[in-house]
């Protein structure tokens, strides 16, 4: 998972975790933490790796791989522990190596790994700021058999570092956000790895048509997926080459490729059996071009997932797109031309088979669109209606009250502030399979909704209540009854204290994102404890410019509540030291 920029996510699928049988372990009074016995053992081993003799002989290969991941995630690759890590875990049998989110991973560690004799099939080095070209060159010595390689967000990597990578078996290459890579570097990798099927070069801002044309010509029909987001220098020359050579391309992402024009995209959609296409923020693609692109897609009848954020569409384009028989996922966010009539057309023509519909930030939409969705959409699992100021949403209750409600897995209504509480209550009480619930910006939300979420949505994985009126009590209930949470957004809720953070730490071990900006009563000590309790690497956004100077929270052991103590008179504080516990 890539490090977040600080903004809370909108609507996205919940992360997929490794499936394991779970044991319930009592922690504290009334708290149940869902954690595997294996996870508990591995956590203990990770913190005591330097004191366990002959450790490597008792661990399976998979256990060694997981331990290495978690040592990175929790910053446990210290100077003292690295000799034991390399001795016990670096073996010639390793098949998966994941070094992510760790300042302690450097060139020297990668050099030691390269000397271990392992020939892994899957290698990830992600967001390790101390890795340079030298480390990647050392790593390339063990990549002869690699099938999946991810070198992401390595700010010191340039073309020089990746030119030595060579593997005839490499099928998936991800170089996302390695901004120093140029055309020469990508061309060298493709020359040495000519069997790549999936390629991610997102945000490699220095790439031009030269490298993308070479990719298309070299990989040809072997290329199945291409993520070219934010390649601002590529033009129709690249898309023409992709259309000419990549006859099996099924997934293409061209978000923010601002120089692409309609002729090249039409060439791709005409010659490639695309199932997934993202044309977000491609500003040079006008209404007529977009209509022609969609028409060529419809002719092939292969498109399943279409994304266009911030683009321009016409009524004819919507009609053609909606009549594509294979279309199941549609995202048309931020399109100002999108009207209630267009939504009616989409739902009437495609509603029977749409699984996902996201029309967030389309400001012309009113309750007529909600009525169309409720009337015609029969299979919806993902619904996005964020930031629609004219929508009250009462018509959505019909969708939430019948058997279709059990199919819904993700509902995002953040910023649609005119929704009455009754609609939100109906949503959470009748959709037991919800995994994603975004209700940010609704200042009328109280603990009542939180209690309802806790009671009716046990499968919840992502929830956002930013700028609401929740208290510790509501958050604690959600933490206890929704133990599989991976993302929680609570920014701007000023009355939350360390109490809710302790509840999340003790009950939700699979968290990997928490947003707490503006929660001034939550202390850094509590956040540190939450990070330590998480199994995975946990990203926490907790900036509090509104915090009082010298804020100190403590737990009153008599009442079991967290209170502010820095502003208490000195003598009463001294007199109560036996009944106050700092977090």
Image: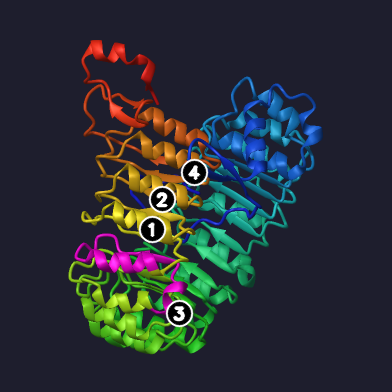
Residue positioned 79% across, 43% down in the render:
93
The reply to whether callout 2 and callout 1 are in contact (CB within 8 Å) is yes
Report the side of 118 relative to 515 (left or right).
Answer: right
Residue positioned 30% across, 12% down in the render:
575
Does 503 appear above or below 240? Answer: above
Q: Secondary structure at mark 2?
A: helix
Residue 258, percent from left and from top: 34, 63
Q: Which of 320 and 8 lies nearest the eye of the viewer?
A: 8
Judged by depth in the image, the label closer to the viewer, 2 or 3, is 2
Specify which label sits upstream in the sequence, 2 or 1: 1
Mark 2–mark 3 Cα distance, whole angstroms, equals 27 Å
Q: Which of 403 and 375 lies nearest the eye of the viewer?
A: 403
Residue positioned 21% across, 20% down in the render:
567
Specify which label sits upstream in the sequence, 3 or 1: 3
Residue positioned 56% across, 49% down in the render:
185
Q: Secondary structure at mark 1?
A: helix
Mark 2–mark 1 Cα distance, whole angstroms, equals 7 Å
Residue 10 visible from this viewpoint: no
Judged by depth in the image, the label closer to the viewer, 4 or 3, is 4
Q: Which residues are magenta?
A: 402-429
Q: Which mark is residue 453?
A: 1
Q: Secondary structure at mark 3?
A: loop
Mark 3–mark 1 Cα distance, whole angstroms, equals 23 Å
Which residue lies under the disc numbered 2?
478
Report the side of 419 relative to 509 (left or right).
Answer: left
Judged by depth in the image, the label closer to the viewer, 3 or 1, is 1
């Amino acid at each position: 998972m890539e490090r977040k920029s600080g903004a809370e996510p909108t609507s996205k699928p919940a992360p997929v975790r490794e499936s394991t049988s779970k044991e319930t372990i009592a922690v504290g009074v009334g708290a149940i933490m869902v954690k595997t016995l294996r996870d508990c053992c591995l956590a203990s081993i990770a913190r005591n790796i330097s004191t366990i003799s002959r450790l490597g002989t008792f661990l399976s290969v998979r256990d060694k791989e997981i331990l290495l991941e978690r040592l990175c995630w929790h910053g446990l690759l210290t100077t003292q522990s690295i000799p034991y890590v390399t001795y016990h875990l670096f073996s010639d049998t390793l098949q998966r190596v994941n070094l992510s989110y760790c300042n302690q991973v450097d060139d020297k560690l990668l050099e030691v790994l390269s000397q271990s004799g392992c020939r892994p099939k899957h290698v990830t080095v992600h967001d390790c700021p101390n890795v340079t070209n030298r480390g990647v060159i050392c790593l390339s010595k063990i990549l002869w058999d690699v099938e999946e390689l991810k070198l992401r967000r390595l700010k010191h990597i340039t073309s020089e570092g990746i030119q030595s990578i060579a593997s005839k078996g490499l099928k998936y290459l991800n170089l996302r956000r390695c901004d120093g890579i140029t055309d020469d570097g990508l061309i060298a990798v493709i020359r040495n790895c000519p069997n790549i099927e999936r390629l991610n070069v997102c945000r490699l801002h220095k790439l031009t048509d030269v490298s993308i044309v070479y990719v298309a010509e070299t990989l040809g029909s072997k290329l199945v997926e291409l993520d070219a987001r934010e390649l601002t220098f590529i033009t129709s020359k690249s898309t023409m080459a992709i259309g000419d050579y990549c006859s099996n391309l099924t997934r293409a992402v061209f978000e923010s490729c601002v120089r692409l024009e309609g002729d090249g995209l039409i060439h791709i959609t005409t010659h490639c059996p695309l199932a997934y296409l993202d044309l977000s923020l491609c500003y040079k693609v006008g209404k007529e071009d977009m209509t022609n692109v969609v028409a060529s897609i419809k002719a092939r009848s292969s498109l399943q997932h279409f994304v266009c954020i911030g683009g321009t569409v016409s009524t004819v384009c919507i009609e053609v797109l909606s009549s594509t028989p294979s279309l199941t996922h549609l995202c048309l966010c931020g399109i100002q031309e999108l009207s209630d009539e267009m939504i009616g057309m989409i739902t009437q023509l495609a509603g029977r088979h749409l699984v996902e519909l996201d029309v967030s930030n389309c400001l012309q939409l009113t309750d007529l669109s909600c009525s169309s969705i409720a009337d015609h959409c029969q299979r919806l699992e993902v619904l996005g209606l964020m930031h629609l100021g004219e929508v009250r949403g009462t018509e959505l209750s019909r969708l939430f009250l019948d058997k279709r409600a059990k199919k819904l897995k993700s509902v995002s209504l953040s910023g649609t502030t005119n929704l009455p509480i009754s609609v939100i209550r109906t949503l959470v009480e009748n959709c037991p399979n919800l995994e994603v619930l975004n209700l940010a910006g609704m200042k009328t939300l109280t603990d009542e909704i939180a209690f309802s979420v806790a009671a009716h949505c046990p499968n919840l994985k992502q929830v956002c209540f930013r700028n609401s009126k929740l208290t510790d009590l509501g958050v604690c209930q959600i933490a206890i009854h929704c133990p599989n949470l991976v993302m929680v957004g609570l920014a701007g809720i000023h009355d939350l204290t360390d109490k809710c953070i302790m509840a999340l730490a003790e009950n939700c071990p699979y968290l990997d994102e928490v947003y707490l900006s503006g929660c001034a009563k939550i202390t850094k000590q509590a956040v540190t404890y939450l990070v330590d309790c998480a199994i995975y690497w946990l990203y926490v956004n907790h900036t509090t410019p509104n915090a009082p100077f010298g804020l100190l929270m403590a737990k009153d052991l008599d009442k079991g509540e967290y209170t502010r103590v820095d502003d208490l008179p000195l003598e009463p504080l001294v007199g109560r030291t036996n009944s106050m516990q700092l977090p």
